């Protein structure tokens, strides 16, 4: 039998998925883990948040309470019929801002998951195929912009939501039920959503901060670095050829 090739055997599989955890020594890789974590925290905080509004008022049969649950996507437009056929209305719409923020978080989660998988199992393609680091860099640019725009929009939407759900605004919009200080309005906390805005801007810092490390992996930086290395140590360009006397 031919003994050649018996020293080292390959798996023979078309796709080698042997993990390489050494990639997490590089900043672009371990920063991606933080991007993955904070993306989940950001969209989960907004999508799973619940608060409430309780309105206490006097009716013919005594004190009564009306309650409204505030949940994602925070599109509040409800009118409840209360005593004496009067209506108690709640109005407020921050749905577009909330959905944009959550969509940014979900897209970032999906991309960072795919990127981490690629780093660990197919990292050699990062060095051998130029388009791979370019796509990683450009996608991160877009998501960093999305985090900045989405966090700013959601901060504005949250401020509007707090205003529309405030006790003074509810009393002002319902003079028939709440006229003459006859209502007691209790609004739940929005602390969880306030934290989500902070996490959104933190995500922007993470994604934008990783751009430098990703740019260093692109052929744009490598070609520029190669040109610099071809210069002489004093930076005056290639040395002139020696002319014989």
Image (cartoon, rainbow, N blue to C red):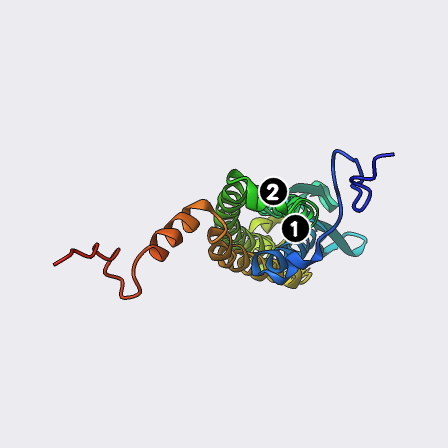
User: Residue drawn at (62%, 46%), measured in percent from left and top?
Assistant: 124
User: Residue drawn at (65%, 48%), measured in percent from left and top?
Assistant: 109
Question: In the rendering, at what x and y percent does residue 230 appear?
Answer: 34, 54
Residue 225 seen in this snapshot: yes
Label 2 Cα crowd, 10 Å radius (few <14 / some 14-19 / many 20+): some
In which quadrant of the rendered view does residue 9 lie? top right
Q: Give the position of the N terminus as an image quadrant.
A: top right
User: Residue drawn at (57%, 49%), measured in percent from left and top?
Assistant: 173
In which quadrant of the rendered view does residue 184 lie? bottom right
Say which residue label 1 marks.
43
In which quadrant of the rendered view does residue 79 lie? top right
The relative height of residue 166 versus residue 14 in the rendered view (above or below) is below
Question: In the rendering, at what x and y percent does residue 114 appear?
Answer: 66, 44
User: Label 2's element?
Assistant: helix
As drawn, the residue found furthest toward the right would be 1
How much space separates mark 2 and mark 1, taking CA atoms?
31 Å
Q: Would residue 8 be found to the left or right of residue 46 on screen?
A: right
Label 1 Cα crowd, 10 Å radius (few <14 / some 14-19 / many 20+): many
Instruction: Give the foreground label among 2 and 1.
Output: 2
Question: In the rendering, at what x and y percent does residue 50 appear?
Answer: 72, 54
User: Label 1's element?
Assistant: helix
Say which residue label 2 marks.
125
């Amino acid at each position: 039998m031919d003994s050649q090739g018996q020293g080292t055997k390959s798996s023979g599989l078309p796709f080698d998925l042997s993990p390489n955890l050494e990639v997490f020594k590089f900043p672009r890789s371990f920063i991606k883990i933080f991007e993955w974590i904070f993306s989940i925290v950001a969209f989960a905080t907004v999508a799973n948040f619940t608060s409430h509004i309780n309105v206490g008022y006097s009716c013919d049969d005594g004190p009564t309470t009306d309650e409204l649950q505030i949940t994602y996507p925070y599109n509040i437009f409800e009118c409840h019929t209360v005593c004496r056929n009067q209506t108690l209305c709640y109005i407020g719409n921050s749905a577009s801002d909330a959905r944009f923020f959550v969509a940014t978080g979900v897209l970032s989660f999906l991309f960072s998951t795919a990127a981490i998988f690629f780093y660990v199992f197919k990292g050699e393609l990062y060095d051998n195929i130029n388009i791979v680091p370019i796509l990683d860099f450009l996608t991160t640019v877009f998501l960093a912009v999305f985090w900045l725009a989405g966090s700013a929009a959601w901060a504005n939407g949250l401020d509007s939501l707090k205003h529309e759900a405030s006790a003074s605004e509810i009393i002002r919009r319902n003079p028939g039920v709440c006229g003459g200080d006859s209502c007691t309005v209790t609004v739940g906390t929005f602390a969880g959503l306030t934290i989500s805005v902070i996490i959104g801007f933190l995500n922007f810092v993470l994604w934008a901060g990783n751009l430098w490390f990703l740019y260093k992996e692109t052929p744009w930086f490598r070609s520029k670095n190669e040109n610099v290395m071809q210069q002489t140590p004093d930076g005056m360009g290639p040395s002139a050829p020696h002319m014989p006397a």
